[in-house]
Amino acid sequence: MAYDVDDAGGREQRGSGGRGSARGIRGLLTVPLAVVSAVAVTLGIAQPAEAAPQPVKRQPKAKATTPGAMRAAASPAGAVPEEVVVAEGDTVSGIAERFGLSTAEVLAHNGLGWSSMIFPGQRLALPGGRAAPAAPPARDAIAKHLVAEGDTMSGIAERYGVALDELLRVNGLGRQSLIFPGEAIVLPPDAADRPAPAPVAAAVPDEPAAPSPADTHVVVDGDTVWDIAARNDIEVAALIAANGLDANATIRPGQRLAIPRPVAVVTVASVSVVLTEEMRANAQLIVDVGRELGVPDSGIAVALAAAAQESGLRNVRHGDRDSQGLFQQRPSQGWGTVEEVLDPVRAARAFYGGPGNPNPGATTGLLDIPGWESMSLTEAAQSVQRSAHPDHYAKWEAQAKAWLAELG
Protein backbone atom coordinates (compact mmCIF):
# COMPACT_ATOMS: atom_id res chain seq x y z
CA MET A 1 0.00 0.00 0.00
CA ALA A 2 1.26 3.49 -0.84
CA TYR A 3 1.82 6.09 1.85
CA ASP A 4 2.24 9.87 1.89
CA VAL A 5 4.32 11.89 4.29
CA ASP A 6 2.08 13.94 6.60
CA ASP A 7 2.89 17.23 8.35
CA ALA A 8 3.56 15.42 11.65
CA GLY A 9 6.26 13.23 10.17
CA GLY A 10 4.05 10.02 10.23
CA ARG A 11 2.47 8.10 7.40
CA GLU A 12 -1.08 8.26 6.14
CA GLN A 13 -2.77 5.95 3.72
CA ARG A 14 -3.85 7.58 0.46
CA GLY A 15 -7.52 8.08 0.16
CA SER A 16 -9.77 8.86 -2.74
CA GLY A 17 -10.65 12.29 -1.30
CA GLY A 18 -7.10 13.66 -1.69
CA ARG A 19 -6.86 14.77 1.94
CA GLY A 20 -3.56 13.01 2.36
CA SER A 21 -2.11 14.69 -0.72
CA ALA A 22 -3.00 18.15 0.54
CA ARG A 23 -1.47 17.48 3.92
CA GLY A 24 1.62 16.06 2.22
CA ILE A 25 2.11 19.17 0.16
CA ARG A 26 1.82 21.37 3.24
CA GLY A 27 4.48 19.27 4.86
CA LEU A 28 6.81 19.84 1.97
CA LEU A 29 6.90 23.58 2.69
CA THR A 30 9.09 22.95 5.76
CA VAL A 31 11.64 20.88 3.84
CA PRO A 32 14.68 22.39 2.09
CA LEU A 33 14.13 23.41 -1.54
CA ALA A 34 16.38 20.72 -3.02
CA VAL A 35 14.54 17.97 -1.06
CA VAL A 36 11.16 19.45 -1.96
CA SER A 37 12.08 19.44 -5.64
CA ALA A 38 13.16 15.81 -5.56
CA VAL A 39 10.06 14.74 -3.66
CA ALA A 40 7.84 16.75 -5.99
CA VAL A 41 9.23 14.97 -9.02
CA THR A 42 8.94 11.58 -7.30
CA LEU A 43 5.31 12.19 -6.39
CA GLY A 44 4.44 13.49 -9.85
CA ILE A 45 3.51 16.93 -8.58
CA ALA A 46 5.99 18.70 -10.89
CA GLN A 47 7.98 17.87 -14.00
CA PRO A 48 11.78 17.76 -13.63
CA ALA A 49 12.27 21.10 -15.40
CA GLU A 50 9.76 22.79 -13.12
CA ALA A 51 11.24 21.33 -9.98
CA ALA A 52 14.82 22.33 -10.73
CA PRO A 53 15.95 25.24 -8.53
CA GLN A 54 16.06 28.51 -10.49
CA PRO A 55 19.37 30.36 -10.69
CA VAL A 56 19.61 33.56 -8.70
CA LYS A 57 19.71 36.66 -10.96
CA ARG A 58 22.39 39.14 -9.98
CA GLN A 59 22.02 42.82 -10.69
CA PRO A 60 24.92 44.28 -12.73
CA LYS A 61 27.21 46.55 -10.79
CA ALA A 62 26.59 50.23 -11.33
CA LYS A 63 29.14 51.93 -13.54
CA ALA A 64 31.43 54.47 -11.92
CA THR A 65 30.39 57.99 -12.81
CA THR A 66 33.13 60.06 -11.22
CA PRO A 67 35.43 61.96 -13.63
CA GLY A 68 38.37 59.85 -12.55
CA ALA A 69 36.52 56.61 -13.11
CA MET A 70 35.22 57.80 -16.47
CA ARG A 71 38.73 58.75 -17.51
CA ALA A 72 40.10 55.37 -16.45
CA ALA A 73 37.34 53.56 -18.33
CA ALA A 74 37.85 55.58 -21.50
CA SER A 75 41.59 55.05 -21.81
CA PRO A 76 44.36 53.24 -19.94
CA ALA A 77 46.43 55.09 -17.37
CA GLY A 78 48.74 57.63 -18.92
CA ALA A 79 47.04 57.32 -22.33
CA VAL A 80 45.78 60.94 -22.44
CA PRO A 81 48.17 62.79 -24.76
CA GLU A 82 49.32 66.34 -24.26
CA GLU A 83 47.43 67.45 -27.36
CA VAL A 84 45.32 66.00 -30.14
CA VAL A 85 45.09 66.98 -33.81
CA VAL A 86 41.49 67.52 -34.91
CA ALA A 87 40.38 65.17 -37.69
CA GLU A 88 37.53 65.56 -40.18
CA GLY A 89 34.21 65.11 -38.34
CA ASP A 90 35.68 65.60 -34.85
CA THR A 91 33.80 67.59 -32.21
CA VAL A 92 35.05 68.88 -28.87
CA SER A 93 32.55 66.70 -27.04
CA GLY A 94 33.62 63.65 -29.04
CA ILE A 95 37.32 64.27 -28.31
CA ALA A 96 36.56 64.81 -24.63
CA GLU A 97 34.57 61.55 -24.46
CA ARG A 98 37.36 59.66 -26.28
CA PHE A 99 39.83 60.49 -23.52
CA GLY A 100 37.45 60.41 -20.58
CA LEU A 101 37.38 64.19 -20.13
CA SER A 102 34.48 66.56 -19.73
CA THR A 103 33.65 68.85 -22.64
CA ALA A 104 33.75 71.88 -20.34
CA GLU A 105 37.32 71.26 -19.16
CA VAL A 106 38.60 70.73 -22.74
CA LEU A 107 36.92 73.99 -23.82
CA ALA A 108 38.33 75.90 -20.84
CA HIS A 109 41.82 74.42 -21.30
CA ASN A 110 41.89 75.76 -24.87
CA GLY A 111 40.16 79.09 -24.20
CA LEU A 112 37.14 78.07 -26.28
CA GLY A 113 33.45 78.77 -25.77
CA TRP A 114 30.47 76.52 -26.37
CA SER A 115 29.91 78.20 -29.76
CA SER A 116 33.55 78.02 -30.89
CA MET A 117 34.35 76.06 -34.06
CA ILE A 118 37.20 73.61 -34.48
CA PHE A 119 38.82 72.64 -37.77
CA PRO A 120 40.64 69.60 -39.15
CA GLY A 121 44.35 69.98 -38.47
CA GLN A 122 43.82 72.22 -35.43
CA ARG A 123 45.70 71.17 -32.28
CA LEU A 124 43.75 70.96 -29.00
CA ALA A 125 45.55 70.67 -25.67
CA LEU A 126 44.13 68.04 -23.32
CA PRO A 127 44.02 68.77 -19.56
CA GLY A 128 46.12 66.32 -17.57
CA GLY A 129 47.74 64.94 -20.72
CA ARG A 130 51.35 63.88 -21.00
CA ALA A 131 53.69 64.41 -23.89
CA ALA A 132 54.10 61.31 -26.00
CA PRO A 133 57.56 59.70 -25.84
CA ALA A 134 59.83 61.07 -28.51
CA ALA A 135 60.05 58.91 -31.59
CA PRO A 136 63.52 57.76 -32.65
CA PRO A 137 65.05 60.05 -35.29
CA ALA A 138 64.48 59.02 -38.87
CA ARG A 139 67.44 57.48 -40.61
CA ASP A 140 67.05 59.78 -43.61
CA ALA A 141 66.34 63.50 -43.23
CA ILE A 142 62.91 64.67 -44.41
CA ALA A 143 62.61 68.04 -46.14
CA LYS A 144 60.25 70.34 -44.26
CA HIS A 145 59.05 73.92 -44.36
CA LEU A 146 58.67 75.82 -41.08
CA VAL A 147 55.42 77.78 -41.16
CA ALA A 148 55.91 81.53 -40.80
CA GLU A 149 53.42 84.28 -40.00
CA GLY A 150 50.98 84.67 -42.91
CA ASP A 151 51.84 81.37 -44.61
CA THR A 152 49.11 79.38 -46.35
CA MET A 153 49.27 75.86 -47.76
CA SER A 154 48.58 77.16 -51.26
CA GLY A 155 51.38 79.72 -50.86
CA ILE A 156 53.84 77.08 -49.63
CA ALA A 157 52.91 74.79 -52.53
CA GLU A 158 53.51 77.62 -54.98
CA ARG A 159 56.89 78.52 -53.47
CA TYR A 160 58.20 74.98 -53.81
CA GLY A 161 56.53 74.30 -57.15
CA VAL A 162 54.45 71.36 -55.94
CA ALA A 163 50.78 70.55 -56.35
CA LEU A 164 48.62 71.75 -53.46
CA ASP A 165 46.73 68.43 -53.29
CA GLU A 166 50.03 66.52 -53.05
CA LEU A 167 51.31 68.80 -50.29
CA LEU A 168 48.07 68.35 -48.36
CA ARG A 169 48.18 64.57 -48.86
CA VAL A 170 51.71 64.02 -47.52
CA ASN A 171 50.82 66.05 -44.42
CA GLY A 172 47.46 64.37 -43.84
CA LEU A 173 45.63 67.68 -44.21
CA GLY A 174 42.46 68.75 -45.97
CA ARG A 175 41.65 71.96 -47.81
CA GLN A 176 40.09 73.43 -44.67
CA SER A 177 42.85 72.38 -42.26
CA LEU A 178 44.61 75.00 -40.13
CA ILE A 179 48.37 75.56 -39.98
CA PHE A 180 50.17 77.57 -37.32
CA PRO A 181 53.44 79.56 -37.14
CA GLY A 182 56.26 77.26 -36.09
CA GLU A 183 54.59 74.13 -37.45
CA ALA A 184 56.72 71.92 -39.76
CA ILE A 185 55.15 71.07 -43.13
CA VAL A 186 56.61 67.97 -44.81
CA LEU A 187 57.54 68.57 -48.45
CA PRO A 188 56.96 65.93 -51.15
CA PRO A 189 60.12 64.07 -52.25
CA ASP A 190 60.37 65.97 -55.55
CA ALA A 191 60.64 69.26 -53.61
CA ALA A 192 63.34 68.05 -51.20
CA ASP A 193 66.24 69.51 -53.19
CA ARG A 194 64.67 72.92 -53.69
CA PRO A 195 65.95 75.64 -51.34
CA ALA A 196 63.35 77.11 -49.04
CA PRO A 197 62.74 80.84 -49.40
CA ALA A 198 63.85 83.08 -46.58
CA PRO A 199 61.09 83.56 -44.00
CA VAL A 200 59.34 86.90 -43.99
CA ALA A 201 60.03 88.78 -40.78
CA ALA A 202 57.09 90.23 -38.92
CA ALA A 203 56.83 94.00 -39.00
CA VAL A 204 58.15 95.70 -35.89
CA PRO A 205 57.40 99.37 -35.12
CA ASP A 206 60.49 101.56 -35.56
CA GLU A 207 59.61 103.95 -32.76
CA PRO A 208 57.69 103.58 -29.51
CA ALA A 209 54.25 105.07 -29.35
CA ALA A 210 53.99 108.62 -28.01
CA PRO A 211 53.39 108.67 -24.26
CA SER A 212 49.82 109.12 -23.14
CA PRO A 213 48.75 112.06 -20.87
CA ALA A 214 49.00 109.72 -17.89
CA ASP A 215 52.74 109.26 -18.61
CA THR A 216 53.67 112.84 -17.73
CA HIS A 217 55.08 114.59 -14.69
CA VAL A 218 54.54 118.26 -13.79
CA VAL A 219 57.75 119.69 -12.31
CA VAL A 220 57.46 121.28 -8.87
CA ASP A 221 59.97 123.26 -6.79
CA GLY A 222 62.85 121.04 -5.66
CA ASP A 223 62.45 118.45 -8.44
CA THR A 224 65.52 117.22 -10.25
CA VAL A 225 65.78 115.02 -13.31
CA TRP A 226 67.51 112.36 -11.20
CA ASP A 227 64.73 112.35 -8.57
CA ILE A 228 61.98 112.11 -11.21
CA ALA A 229 63.80 109.27 -13.00
CA ALA A 230 64.28 107.36 -9.74
CA ARG A 231 60.61 107.76 -8.70
CA ASN A 232 59.43 106.42 -12.09
CA ASP A 233 62.03 103.63 -12.26
CA ILE A 234 63.54 104.81 -15.55
CA GLU A 235 67.01 105.77 -16.71
CA VAL A 236 68.02 109.43 -16.48
CA ALA A 237 69.30 109.31 -20.05
CA ALA A 238 65.92 108.00 -21.24
CA LEU A 239 64.09 110.83 -19.46
CA ILE A 240 66.45 113.45 -20.95
CA ALA A 241 66.14 111.98 -24.46
CA ALA A 242 62.32 111.73 -24.28
CA ASN A 243 62.04 115.43 -23.41
CA GLY A 244 64.91 116.89 -25.50
CA LEU A 245 66.58 118.44 -22.46
CA ASP A 246 69.90 120.24 -22.71
CA ALA A 247 73.21 118.85 -21.49
CA ASN A 248 72.62 120.28 -18.02
CA ALA A 249 69.16 118.69 -17.82
CA THR A 250 67.64 122.00 -16.81
CA ILE A 251 63.98 121.87 -15.74
CA ARG A 252 61.66 124.48 -14.24
CA PRO A 253 58.50 124.38 -12.07
CA GLY A 254 55.31 123.87 -14.08
CA GLN A 255 57.14 122.16 -16.92
CA ARG A 256 55.55 118.91 -18.15
CA LEU A 257 57.95 116.03 -18.65
CA ALA A 258 57.07 112.96 -20.67
CA ILE A 259 57.80 109.73 -18.81
CA PRO A 260 58.96 107.12 -21.35
CA ARG A 261 57.48 103.65 -20.89
CA PRO A 262 58.64 100.43 -22.55
CA VAL A 263 56.43 99.38 -25.42
CA ALA A 264 54.78 96.03 -24.75
CA VAL A 265 55.19 93.66 -27.67
CA VAL A 266 52.30 91.22 -27.93
CA THR A 267 52.72 88.23 -30.21
CA VAL A 268 49.47 86.70 -31.44
CA ALA A 269 49.50 83.34 -33.19
CA SER A 270 47.76 83.62 -36.54
CA VAL A 271 45.78 80.93 -38.30
CA SER A 272 45.90 80.03 -41.96
CA VAL A 273 42.85 78.44 -43.54
CA VAL A 274 42.24 77.21 -47.07
CA LEU A 275 38.70 78.30 -47.96
CA THR A 276 36.17 75.66 -48.96
CA GLU A 277 33.53 76.58 -51.53
CA GLU A 278 31.01 77.29 -48.76
CA MET A 279 33.46 79.41 -46.77
CA ARG A 280 34.56 81.31 -49.87
CA ALA A 281 30.95 82.08 -50.85
CA ASN A 282 30.18 83.43 -47.36
CA ALA A 283 33.40 85.47 -47.24
CA GLN A 284 32.58 86.95 -50.67
CA LEU A 285 29.08 87.81 -49.45
CA ILE A 286 30.48 89.65 -46.40
CA VAL A 287 32.84 91.60 -48.67
CA ASP A 288 30.07 92.44 -51.17
CA VAL A 289 27.65 93.65 -48.48
CA GLY A 290 30.41 95.78 -46.97
CA ARG A 291 31.20 97.34 -50.34
CA GLU A 292 27.51 98.03 -50.93
CA LEU A 293 27.26 99.83 -47.58
CA GLY A 294 30.45 101.81 -48.18
CA VAL A 295 32.35 100.16 -45.34
CA PRO A 296 36.13 100.75 -45.56
CA ASP A 297 38.53 97.82 -45.90
CA SER A 298 39.39 97.87 -42.19
CA GLY A 299 35.71 97.36 -41.31
CA ILE A 300 35.27 94.51 -43.80
CA ALA A 301 38.35 92.81 -42.34
CA VAL A 302 36.73 93.08 -38.89
CA ALA A 303 33.57 91.39 -40.22
CA LEU A 304 35.56 88.59 -41.89
CA ALA A 305 37.56 87.93 -38.72
CA ALA A 306 34.41 87.94 -36.57
CA ALA A 307 32.59 85.47 -38.84
CA ALA A 308 35.66 83.23 -39.04
CA GLN A 309 35.95 83.06 -35.25
CA GLU A 310 32.23 82.68 -34.56
CA SER A 311 31.21 80.14 -37.21
CA GLY A 312 34.22 79.25 -39.33
CA LEU A 313 32.51 81.22 -42.16
CA ARG A 314 29.67 78.70 -42.18
CA ASN A 315 25.99 79.50 -41.85
CA VAL A 316 25.51 77.05 -38.98
CA ARG A 317 22.18 76.29 -37.35
CA HIS A 318 23.54 75.84 -33.83
CA GLY A 319 25.66 77.62 -31.24
CA ASP A 320 25.88 78.74 -27.63
CA ARG A 321 22.36 79.03 -26.25
CA ASP A 322 20.26 80.38 -29.17
CA SER A 323 23.19 81.71 -31.26
CA GLN A 324 22.99 80.84 -34.95
CA GLY A 325 24.29 81.83 -38.36
CA LEU A 326 27.50 83.35 -39.72
CA PHE A 327 27.98 85.75 -36.80
CA GLN A 328 26.25 83.61 -34.13
CA GLN A 329 23.60 86.28 -33.60
CA ARG A 330 20.99 85.57 -30.92
CA PRO A 331 17.28 86.03 -31.62
CA SER A 332 16.71 86.48 -27.88
CA GLN A 333 18.98 89.54 -27.92
CA GLY A 334 17.10 91.38 -30.68
CA TRP A 335 19.14 90.29 -33.71
CA GLY A 336 16.03 88.98 -35.49
CA THR A 337 14.04 85.78 -35.78
CA VAL A 338 15.76 82.44 -36.30
CA GLU A 339 15.04 82.67 -40.03
CA GLU A 340 16.40 86.23 -40.15
CA VAL A 341 19.72 85.52 -38.40
CA LEU A 342 20.18 82.54 -40.72
CA ASP A 343 19.85 84.86 -43.73
CA PRO A 344 23.56 85.61 -44.39
CA VAL A 345 22.92 88.90 -46.21
CA ARG A 346 20.74 90.21 -43.40
CA ALA A 347 23.20 88.93 -40.78
CA ALA A 348 26.05 90.80 -42.49
CA ARG A 349 23.99 94.00 -42.65
CA ALA A 350 23.18 93.65 -38.95
CA PHE A 351 26.88 93.20 -38.12
CA TYR A 352 27.85 96.33 -40.08
CA GLY A 353 24.89 98.32 -38.72
CA GLY A 354 24.76 102.00 -39.55
CA PRO A 355 21.97 103.40 -41.77
CA GLY A 356 21.38 99.93 -43.22
CA ASN A 357 20.96 98.24 -39.83
CA PRO A 358 17.93 95.89 -40.10
CA ASN A 359 17.51 96.10 -36.30
CA PRO A 360 17.51 99.87 -35.68
CA GLY A 361 17.58 100.66 -31.98
CA ALA A 362 17.72 96.97 -31.03
CA THR A 363 21.31 95.98 -31.89
CA THR A 364 24.57 97.88 -32.32
CA GLY A 365 26.58 97.23 -35.47
CA LEU A 366 30.16 98.20 -36.25
CA LEU A 367 29.23 101.51 -37.92
CA ASP A 368 27.10 102.43 -34.89
CA ILE A 369 30.16 102.43 -32.58
CA PRO A 370 31.82 105.86 -32.24
CA GLY A 371 35.54 105.75 -33.01
CA TRP A 372 35.61 102.15 -34.21
CA GLU A 373 38.07 103.17 -36.94
CA SER A 374 40.76 103.88 -34.32
CA MET A 375 40.22 100.57 -32.51
CA SER A 376 42.23 97.42 -33.07
CA LEU A 377 40.50 94.68 -35.05
CA THR A 378 39.94 92.71 -31.85
CA GLU A 379 38.43 95.67 -30.01
CA ALA A 380 36.15 96.51 -32.91
CA ALA A 381 34.91 92.93 -33.33
CA GLN A 382 34.36 92.57 -29.59
CA SER A 383 32.37 95.83 -29.48
CA VAL A 384 29.81 94.20 -31.75
CA GLN A 385 29.98 90.54 -30.73
CA ARG A 386 30.57 90.90 -26.95
CA SER A 387 32.21 87.49 -26.80
CA ALA A 388 33.29 85.67 -23.64
CA HIS A 389 36.70 85.29 -25.34
CA PRO A 390 37.43 88.75 -26.78
CA ASP A 391 41.10 88.09 -27.56
CA HIS A 392 40.42 85.30 -30.04
CA TYR A 393 39.56 87.60 -32.94
CA ALA A 394 43.18 88.78 -33.17
CA LYS A 395 44.47 85.50 -34.59
CA TRP A 396 42.26 86.00 -37.68
CA GLU A 397 43.53 89.50 -38.54
CA ALA A 398 46.27 88.53 -41.03
CA GLN A 399 44.08 85.88 -42.64
CA ALA A 400 41.07 88.24 -42.92
CA LYS A 401 43.20 90.86 -44.68
CA ALA A 402 44.54 88.20 -47.05
CA TRP A 403 41.01 87.05 -47.87
CA LEU A 404 39.95 90.66 -48.51
CA ALA A 405 42.88 91.19 -50.88
CA GLU A 406 41.96 87.98 -52.71
CA LEU A 407 38.20 88.54 -52.90
CA GLY A 408 38.28 92.26 -53.59
Image (cartoon, rainbow, N blue to C red):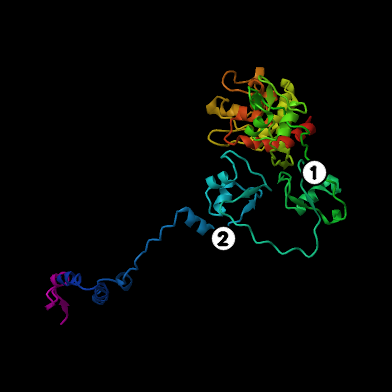
Q: Residue at x 77, y 43 (%)?
A: 152
Location of residue 257 (image quadrant): top right
Of the two numbered discs 2 and 1 on the same chain, state the one appearing first in sequence. Answer: 2
Q: Quadrant of the C terminus?
A: top right
- SS for dot 2: loop
Residues in magenta, as a range: 1-22
Q: Residue furthest top?
A: 355
Location of residue 31 (image quadrant): bottom left
Q: Residue at x 76, y 42 (%)?
A: 149
Looking at the picture, how far across and down is residue 46, in whole percent?
Answer: 27, 71
Q: Give residue 190's mark.
A: none
Q: Report the residue marked by disc 1.
A: 154
Query: Left of 180 or right of it: where is 220?
Result: left
The residue closer to the viewer here, 178 or 195, is 195
The residue closer to the viewer here, 169 or 34, is 169
Say if 396 sits above or below 194 in the image.
above
Looking at the picture, how far across and down is residue 370, in whole percent?
Answer: 64, 20
